Amino acid sequence: MKLLDGLWFGVDGKWLETADRYTSGWGYSRVEYGGDVRVRRTDFVPDGVRGAVVGLTLRAGTTKRVKLDVDAHSELMSSYPWGWTTPSAGDANLPDTGDFQGKALRFREQGTPSYPNASKHDYAAYVGSSLPPTAHTLGPDHRGPQSPAVICPADGTTPARCDDSLIGKGTGGRLTYEIDLQANQERTIWFAAAGSDEGSAAAKREYDKALRNPEKLLQAKIRQRAEIDGRSKVELPGDQLLQQSIAWSKQNLADSVQEARDLQVRDVNEGKDYPTPAGKIDTARWFGAGFPDYPWLFATDGEYTSYAAVAAGQFDTVKTHLRALRDISDLLNQRSGKVAHEIIPTGDVYFGSNQSAGNTDETVKFPSIVALLWRWTGDDRFRDEMYDFSVRNLRYVYRELDRDQDGWPEGLANVERSGMGAEKLDSTVYLARGLRDLADLAAARKDRPTAQWATARATELEQRFEAQWWVPKALGYADSIDDPADPGNDNTPIFQRHWTGVTPMEAELVRPDKPTSPLASPEHAAAALDQREKPCYTGEFGLFHTGTGPTSDAAGNPGPSCDPVVSQVKSERSIFSLNTSIMAVAEGNYGRLGKTQQQVYTTGNARIQLDPKVWETPGAMPEIAPSPDSPANIGRPFYDRSMNLQAWGTYGVLWPVVHQQLGVDPDLGHGRLTIVPQLPEGQQKVAGSNIRLGRGAVDVTARLTAKELRTDVTSYGVTAKLTVGAVLPAGANVQRVTLNGHTVNYQLQKTARGTELHVAARGARNELRITLR
């Protein structure tokens, strides 16, 4: 639930508005203001407290007493319903009241909205400090320098600045303090805004927890984030920007974690209905998709984010995310196997019931994320817990989403644009991967019928894939195909240049006794990736959502044409961090780590996260990069911005470095671990330490020195059969291979990445040396 519209501070009659410096920290943010009294504001959210804490540190050059004003404007409201749904937020949001309790402002919203199935509620928030104020006032405004508020109209032209909407029913208050400062000495005053949906007494308990020892809470937060930084710690001397991006991406994942309790699960049918709940979920914990607008539980977002999370060693949240999806989906959909798409922390499911169209892709991806976590942890108990739901996922798709029985799943997928056929490329690709992963899970559980069924389906799909989906004139894969069950359709490929055309190269398939490889054939993959690297598909910061036709430069000189196929969909040159991630991973799957290949896309995501000329919030991976069709967030009104932190963008830096460059490829469910690094073009060393695998970890270093490739691996508490190696440079011949100083036998294996050299390792520490001719 939301507590406040905002919190404002003023010193000696002047509101703190224009800052000298803004800093993102690990688990906190900091703003610094100049003037006669210098102020440093530190904001953080303590773990386990339903509220936020602000530390205001003041310093003056002379001994003096300063007047400190604190404005707070409430807006107690649930995260659903929204402004345009039925019922609407206007229907649900009741007027707030404010009063002064002890040393704090108290805001409350109590009552029962008038629409059917509404519940009585008692929301409360406290705002204040451990210091007693010298004065307080209450009133309808109190928004610091934003008083009086600018209200957004319901229609017509929206002003550049909006402080509230017509739905807003909050109220305000001010606390005033007299603060004595000693010359050139800092003094910190701590403030808290905390609340509860369980009444005033519960809100007060949260408020007291927040102010009991805020410095200790902040240090605990920083220590916890330092521990996260210590996992999957990389050293990339040839790419310092990417090294920084890895560090911040781990923090972004931790920043994204959300938890809700007592979720009342109901199908709100895309905001059209508000039925009685189907049931209750006690607790859900997940990776929130995007901040600030939708930190909800999403299936498709969480499934992509899981690859980044396992590479970062953040296994526990992946587990709870999957549990929440399973539990809510089964309750909502009567155990059909369909995965719900978008779940609000209240339990309201906006989209994804049996009665809605999709999204198909997230149902077919679920078994793959279970398999992913099982391979990285070896956790058979979790595999078994998720197994039944994983089987029902794919059975549901074939039972309900393949009405023409052609093997290509129907329904919505990631791209929801006009002109697409009923059967989507990304759903097909992820179904192929999901079938192979389900077969692997089934075999491990000795469920032979399911393993045979999934293997047969996968084999048949893979054999027919290229003939159906490859579009030779476009040098790419169709985005969708029409449905022959509809009159006049005959499985015609529809090519529209969407980013999902890269997924056949991005999704890796695990097949028994064969090297792991993507679905796309090597020949088609090379052609398709070459095309996507061109300016009509790729901009300064990564991959466009939808590519263009012929391009030209600023002087009007013609550029390369994407393809001779005429697309019926307008280009959409918005660069989403996910699109760029998909391309980065796809390039790495085929060993394309060059400066004009993978490095374009890893650098693109790293820059929008860390380049001061680009980012909105330093260190945060945003949803959309500054793009030809999507101006930078920083120059747009707040109500018109994309997310300043989008969790799935971390997929495009963590997975390429840990899994592809460092070559960490665990299969702990089967007791195996393979580490085969590949050095990016132009780089002599990549290294990673404390890469979590199950209950242990590994350190990996790969180097190229003159004619010698080196791979050093040290494992800590990892029980698995270890294979170490390296991807050989193109055209290289092996002269000699030693392990821990002794000449050893080796195997060469042709893979999508290139020629890999493998050696069976011995013990916990292994030093592999490959001398090239």
Image (tube, rainbow, N blue to C red):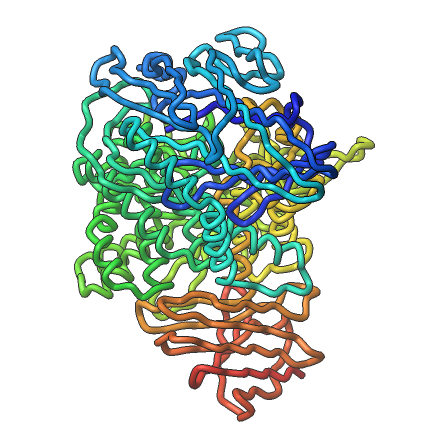
Q: In this view, does 531 lie to the left or right of 371?
A: right
- Which image quadrant is residue 149 in? top right
In this view of the protein, which residue sits in the foreground, 511 or 660? 660
Q: In this view, does 726 lie to the left or right of 483?
A: right
In the image, residue 730 above or below residue 478: below
In the image, residue 571 above or below residue 274: below
Quadrant location, the C terminus: bottom right
Quadrant location, the N terminus: top left
Q: Is residue 760 visible?
A: no
In this view of the protein, which residue sits in the foreground, 100 or 738? 100
- Which image quadrant is residue 580 in? top right
Residue located 66% across and 75% down the image = 704
* The furthest residue to the bottom: 742
Residue located 38% across and 75% down the image = 717
Residue 465 horizontal/vertical position (percent)? 40, 49
Residue located 28% across and 27% down the image = 199
Q: Is residue 395 visible?
A: yes
In this view of the protein, which residue sits in the foreground, 58 or 491? 58
Residue 107 horizontal/vertical position (percent)? 38, 21
In the image, residue 452 above or below residue 108: below
Residue 439 horizontal/vertical position (percent)? 27, 59
Residue 263 horizontal/vertical position (percent)? 25, 34
